[in-house]
Structures are given as C-alpha cells and as structure tokens.
Amino acid sequence: MSDGSKPRPDGQLLDHMYDGIQEFDNPLPGWWSAFFIITIVFSGFYLFWYHLGGPGKSIDQVYAADYKAYEQQRIEREAADVNAVSEASLATTAANPEMLAKGQAIFVSTCASCHKEDGSGLIGPNLTDDNQLHGTTRKDIFMTVQGGVPNTAMVPWAAQLKPADLVAVAAYVTTLRNHPKPGKAPEGAPVGPFAAP
C-alpha cells in the first residue's frame, strides 16, 4: 500500500545533501499552487477594497464611525436630560441633602473662584442677595450655569460637567438666593423667593 502523504520522486535528484539525506526536485502539488495563486489574487482584491479607494472600511474607519455615532447619541441623551430639567426637578434636587452636598462641593471646586465659597460674589455677582442678574427662576439659573453668559467670564459648564452635576450645582445655587451675605453689591433685578414649582 503506497503512502499518499509522501511526494513522488518524479523530479531530478538535487546535488546537495544534508545529514545523508538527498532531496528530489518535485513540482509543487496542484492544489498548493492553486491556493497560492488564490491568496495573491485575494490580497490584491483586499488591498483595493479596504485601502485603495474601494467601498470597504478599515478598522480605523469603522472605529471612527462607531465613535461618531456614540458621541451623537451621548449629546442627544444629555440634551434630553437637560430638557427634562424643570422648576420642579430643581426644587426637588435642592431638597435632597445628598444632591445638595454634591452641588455644594462642585460649587466650591468650580465656581468659588468667581463667586467665593459662600456665594457672596467676587468677579461674578453676589448669589446670596435678593437680586438675580440673568432671569428670575430656578431654570434661569440652571440655563446660566449650563450655557454660560456670552462676553462674560461665565463659561458654559455643560462642556465640563455631567448633566447630573449641572443639576446639582444649579440646585445648590438656588438655595443661596434670598439669604444675603456681605459681599459684592447687588446686580440685576430684585426678585423675591422662588415661586412654588
């Protein structure tokens, strides 16, 4: 019975020898040659499809497209969260001790340089008096924190804070109003206590 795994010694016996073993110059099996040609053709097709203007997308392009879609979804989700903010939600947040503590911590770390830690004003207005410079409501305060005030030092914090943090710090600021502390002179229109949500 012949061994089909061994090449047939049809070729010429080569003149080199290693450890007493000589090699026949057999032709490559047909299936191997065909597979080799197919891989060359496939590599050319692959190169054109993914790297030379073909419709295929590289891994980097797929990643960039996925990341762009993720960013769009994130922006839309955050916008939806911002749109969900209301007088009632801000009042509820301001009544939550944990969220209030979180908002105070954010205020101290990000807002105190302009408003002082107690909110009595420095570069920015005094937030503790009975006046409000931009709007009159809780939502106006939130919108000021979120979008900033053009041509002033008040930057839009939406680019740096998460939606939940924006809500927390805005809710904390609402608790400062109408509790005057010595500081910067009042700015803006006089306002009374917030209306019930």
Image (cartoon, grey):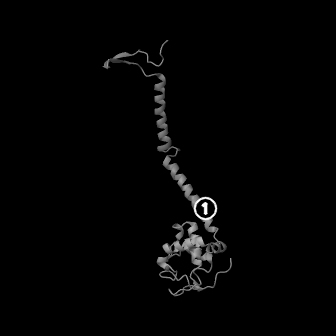
Q: Quadrant of residue 143?
A: bottom right
Q: Tell me which residue sits at (48%, 26%) in the image.
A: 34
Look at the numbered disc 1 and give the secondary structure of its residue: helix
- When the figure is inspected, residue 85 is found, relative to residue 121, above or below; the finding is above
Instruction: Give percent across and percent down for residue 149.
Output: 53, 76
* Front residue (pair 160, 147): 160
Q: Residue at x 50, y 47 (%)?
A: 59
- Expressed as whole percent of the image width and height from the top left, the position of residue 163 reads 57, 67
Give amino acid for label 1: Arg
Q: Which residue is mark 1?
A: 77
Query: Looking at the image, which residue is at 60% across and 73% down?
Result: 97
Q: Which one is in front, 131 or 147? A: 131
- Compared to 158, does 50 lie above or below? above
Q: Quadrant of the C terminus?
A: bottom right
Residue 153 visible to an observer of this rendering: no
In this view, the residue farthest toward the front is 97
Name above or below for residue 195 compared with residue 62: below
**Res 81 → quadrant:** bottom right
